[in-house]
Image (cartoon, helix red, strand yellow):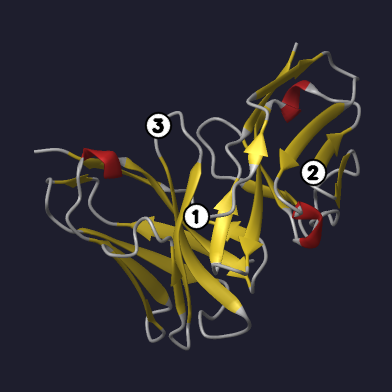
Amino acid sequence: SYVLTQTPSVSLAPGKTATITCGGNDIGSKNVHWYQQKPGQAPLLVIYYDSDRPSGIPERFSGSNSGNTATLTISRVEAGDEADYYCQVWDGSTDQVVFGGGTKLTVL
Amino acid sequence: QVQLQESGPGLVKPSQTLSLTCTVSGGSISSGDHYWSWIRQTPGKGLEWIGSMIYSGSTDYNPSLKSRVSISVDTSKNQFALKLRSVTAADTARYYCARKEGFGDFDYWGLGIQVTVSS
């Protein structure tokens, strides 16, 4: 089955740029979606189809996808961005939804 | 604005069937290219997709759960349901219902319901 690999944790100071990666075999050929989950809350879609932002998501959130790595970038990180971030794809070869293991973003 | 709300028992005995319902408001469950889905999350762990169903009846399930899972849609009540048979402690999790846009993203989620499997 298709596997998505995420770095377990990322820590950085406020105002810096966070880069959260999602690795998968030829992931660039798939559509990648990103979710933010804060403690005690349901996941929230922050990027869909690699780089589109839903209404209400700040422009500081952006995404890209190429080769074997998809990337979620959060510019000018704020304390309120502290959360777990998950990538997700649809694997058409097996008709399955696949989630990455998640990355915990800590704002120091 | 579409809203989803999970309901069902918070405690299930081992070997029994876990049954949850998701009520959809703000939109019709039988419109569009939407797959009505269940996802779970164990304490301190990541997200696990359980399965998805479109109102016309087509379903996709996680292969690791497929032998024990069924998802159904009740268009008259604008609800969809999850049944997970022969549960064990490993099925203890927070269960979310969500709407999936075609083969894409989950754009609307319920708040989730905690289900514990214990005698």
Q: Which amino acid is tagged 2?
A: Thr
Instruction: Pinpoint the chain carrying mark 3.
Output: B
- Circle 1: residue type: Gly
On the same chain: label 2 and label 1? no
Specify whether B63 is left or right of B2: left
Question: Badge 2 is on which residue?
Answer: A69
Instruction: Decide: is B102 above or below B105.
Output: below
Secondary structure type for disc 2: strand
Q: Are marks 3 and 1 in contact (CB under 8 Å)?
A: no
Label ID, residue B43? 3
Q: Note whether B108 is above or below B35 in the view shown.
A: above
Same chain for labels 3 and 1? Say yes or no. yes
Residue B64 picture location, percent across and down: 37, 55
Chain under callout 2: A
Could you tell me which secondary element the residue under label 3 belongs to? Answer: loop
Which residue sits at x=81%, y=55%? Answer: A28
Q: Between residues B28 and A2, which one lies in front from this camera angle?
A: A2
Q: Secondary structure at mark 1?
A: loop
Q: CA distance from mark 2 to mark 1?
A: 29 Å
Q: Tell whether B45 sits left or right of A83.
A: left
Q: At 89% across and 38% down in the image, what residue appears?
A: A60
Question: Residue B66 appears at what percent x and percent y?
Answer: 34, 64
Q: Dividing the picture into quarters, in which one does residue B76 lie?
A: bottom left
| Quadrant of image for the C terminus of chain B | top left
Determine whether, in the image, residue A39 is placed left or right of residue A70. Answer: left
Tag nearer the camera, 2 or 1: 2
Could you tell me if residue B2 is visible in this image?
no
Q: Are marks 2 and 3 on the same chain?
A: no
Relative vertical location of residue A107 with respect to residue B26 in this rendering, above or below = above
| Residue behind mark 1 | B110
Quarter holding the N terminus of chain B? bottom right
